[in-house]
Image (spheres, rainbow, N blue to C red):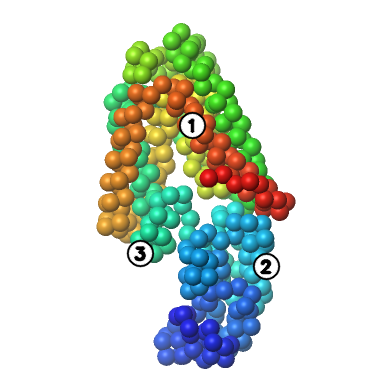
Amino acid sequence: MPYGSYHVSVEDGVRNALRLVKDGGAAAVKLEGGERRLELIARMVEAEIPVMGHIGLTPQSFHRFGGFKVQGKSAEAAAALLHDARAIEAAGAFSLVLESIPREIATEITRELRIPTIGIGAGVVIRPALTLLFPIPNHNPIPPRIISVIATSISGAWSHVGQRITNIRLAMFLEVSTTIGALAGALAGVLLHAWVLSLIFGVLVIYMATVSFRSRKTEDRMLETGGFAQPAEGVAHRLGLHGEYYDQAARMSVSYNVTGGVGGSLVAMLAGAGSGLLGIGGGIFKVAAMNSFMGVPMKAAAATSKFMIGITGATSAIVYFLAGGIDQYIVAPVVLGTMLGATGGSYVMNRLHSRVIKMIFFLLLFYLGYQMFAKGVSMGFGLKLPGLI
């Protein structure tokens, strides 16, 4: 309902809702707010007006929040949102909008309610940038975000494939495991609490970060001594997953054999499970799987992972394209900017030493792992750990 049409009094809100249904042809009305709207929702339901609730970031009162900010980030705020959601359902609402709420909190609320929920306001960078900095509705940035992933993959892939850094056979092998993991993760996400998942994956990511940090100096020595050219074994040997590329920073040709096909595929499966459970990107997991568990040099692992994310993103993009959900006026500038950045990154990567790339990778992994772990602790135990930038 429009701002001001239900804010003065309950009677005024019911009267305006009746007009919307009777004269405006509305099949239902949507109200923003939690506990303070319970009496109004109940009165509208008594008047046989279907009501949809809306909590989290409520645009009609965004000045009270200090702007468009994510809601429910603290344990107290998350508990209040869950309380509001249950109360709105008890008052008779037929569905509930959850806007700009952390994915884990939204999942917990959805699991607790019997009525359907609609989540808007997600994505790591592209989606909030488009919704908050430009006048674009919340549902529209989803296709551009997916297209930006494809653009990143294509921009980096053509350069890396041309330099023979990308291992296409290995990418296809791991993509199967990632897909299986994503399906299993989506099913497990229905059964497990969100805070448990955050703790598990937070610990896993921090462990991978630690492994990457410890081996940052070892990799350059292995490149110089041919340490990656260990005899291939098992599945990797039968599928011919070996590779070779020219390292511009080390000024030498690097040959390597994949040595842990089964272990790497299991970690890739966990990457897919993370995407299915928490909606996180699996690219960094696959880089860690290839580099730490399969004996693939860091540069080849990063290039191969970038190639893989394009395959996954293309699958989702096809659905949006066939449904007519891709707006060329939004997608075009996003793709242009993404491709310029990805092309520049691909140009620089092969000119950096592996220890530098590993340090960047470590910082990224540790940040992500800590944030996931801290969120799990906050949701599960109500403890707030110190935040990172």
Mark 2 or mark 3, which has the lower sequence index? Answer: 2
Amino acid type, residue under disc 3 in the picture: Pro
Q: Position of residue 6 (x, y in %)?
A: 52, 84
Q: Nearer the viewer, mark 2 or mark 1?
A: 1
Q: Is residue 16 above or below residue 59?
A: below
The residue carrying pointer 2 sits among few (fewer than 14), some (14 to 19) or many (20 or more) residues within 10 Å by Cα, namely some
Q: Which residue is mark 2?
A: 83
Amino acid type, residue under disc 2 in the picture: His
Q: Which residue is mark 1?
A: 361
Can you see residue 325?
yes
Which residue appears farthest toward the top when viewing the image?
Answer: 225
- Say which element carries label 2: helix
Q: Residue at x 63, y 46 (%)?
A: 386
- Say which element carries label 1: helix
The number of numbered badges drawn on the structure is: 3
Say which of 25 and 295 sits in front. 295
Say which of 187 and 249 sits in front. 249
- What is the CA distance from the residue labelled 2 to the residue labelled 3? 31 Å
Q: Is residue 70 above or below residue 254?
A: below
- What is the CA distance from the residue labelled 3 to the residue labelled 1? 34 Å
Q: Residue at x 41, y 25 (%)?
A: 299
- Tell me which corner region of the image, top left, top right, bottom left or bottom right, holds residue 209: top right
Q: Residue at x 46, y 90 (%)?
A: 19
Q: Is residue 5 left or right of residue 385?
A: left
Which residue appears farthest toward the right when viewing the image?
Answer: 381
Q: Is residue 22 above or below residue 127?
A: below
Q: Which residue is mark 3?
A: 135
- What is the CA distance from the residue labelled 2 to the residue labelled 1? 39 Å
* Circle number at residue 20: none
Q: Position of residue 234 (x, y in %)?
A: 53, 17
Q: Is residue 68 left or right of residue 105?
A: left
The residue carrying pointer 1 sits among few (fewer than 14), some (14 to 19) or many (20 or more) residues within 10 Å by Cα, namely many
